[in-house]
Amino acid sequence: MENAKLYYAKFYDAKFNKYTTLKDAYLNHASLGRTNLSGINLSGAELAHAILCRANLSNADLSNTDLENVDLSNANLHNANLTNASLVSYRIPFDTRERYEVDLSNAILTNANLNNAYLENADLTDADLSNATLKNVNLKNTILKNALLNNTNAENTNLTEALGINEIPEPPQL
């Protein structure tokens, strides 16, 4: 399904096998909630405004992917590759009845654009955020244990009660 045009497609609760490729697919506004996309190649895909709540994206290749304004509430992105991905203005939908969490542990987020993202309660344990842009990001209550933040721009980022933050070295004073 490489280069597939699947705008507004509904794959809710679908199960893809690991040999499926959605490389460079157009999945803007697609409904992929509770879908098993573990190990799937989604590199270069356009997923802006897609619904990926409770989706399993563990070990998925999301490099160079447009994830602007997606719903990743309670999604599993463990070991996912998000190199050069754009999560600009990513927001967890507001719902006071449920605590939203995203598993980004061991995720590769090098050079990722996370400007204005809302990642409260996310697990970024052992994630590689090297050279990522995190301007105006909400990382409140986020787990950052052993996360790599080399050359990461975290201007105006909320790190209130973030766990593992004390392990991050202070930037040198100029």
Image (cartoon, rainbow, N blue to C red):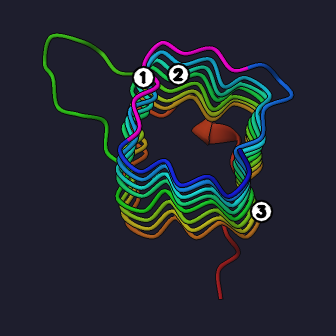
Residue at left 31%, top 36%? Answer: 92
Dominant SS type (magenta): loop
Which one is nearer the viewer's eye here, 59 or 134?
59
First-in-chain label (1 vs 3): 1
Residue depth check, mark 3 versus mark 2: number of the one nearer the observer: 2
Residue at left 75%, top 35%? Answer: 60
Quadrant (top left, top right, bottom left, bottom right) of the N terminus: top right
Which one is nearer the viewer's eye here, 163 or 101?
101
Classify mark 3: residues with Cα within 10 Å, few (<14), some (14-19) or many (20+).
Answer: some
Outermost residue to the left: 96
Residue kind at label 1, given as amino acid type: Gly
Residue kind at label 3, given as amino acid type: Asn
From this viewpoint, is residue 169 visible? no
Q: Does the magenta stretch include residue 1?
A: no
Quadrant (top left, top right, bottom left, bottom right) of the C terminus: bottom right
Is there CB contact under 8 Å for labels 2 and 1? Answer: yes
Residue 151 in the image, given as x and y percentages of width and height: 73, 70
Is there CB contact under 8 Å for labels 1 and 3? Answer: no
Pointer 3: what residue? 150
Q: In this view, does 114 lie above or below 126?
A: below
Pointer 2: what residue? 55
Q: Is mark 3 on a helix, strand or loop?
A: loop
Left or right of residue 138, residue 128 in this image: right
Which stretch is magenta? 9-16
Left or right of residue 98, residue 127 in this image: right
First-in-chain label (3 vs 2): 2
Q: Is residue 130 above or below residue 151?
A: above
Q: Is residue 14 magenta?
A: yes
Residue 104 in the image, given as x and y percentages of width and height: 63, 32
Residue kind at label 2, given as amino acid type: Ala
Res. 115 image quadrant = bottom left
Pointer 1: what residue? 33
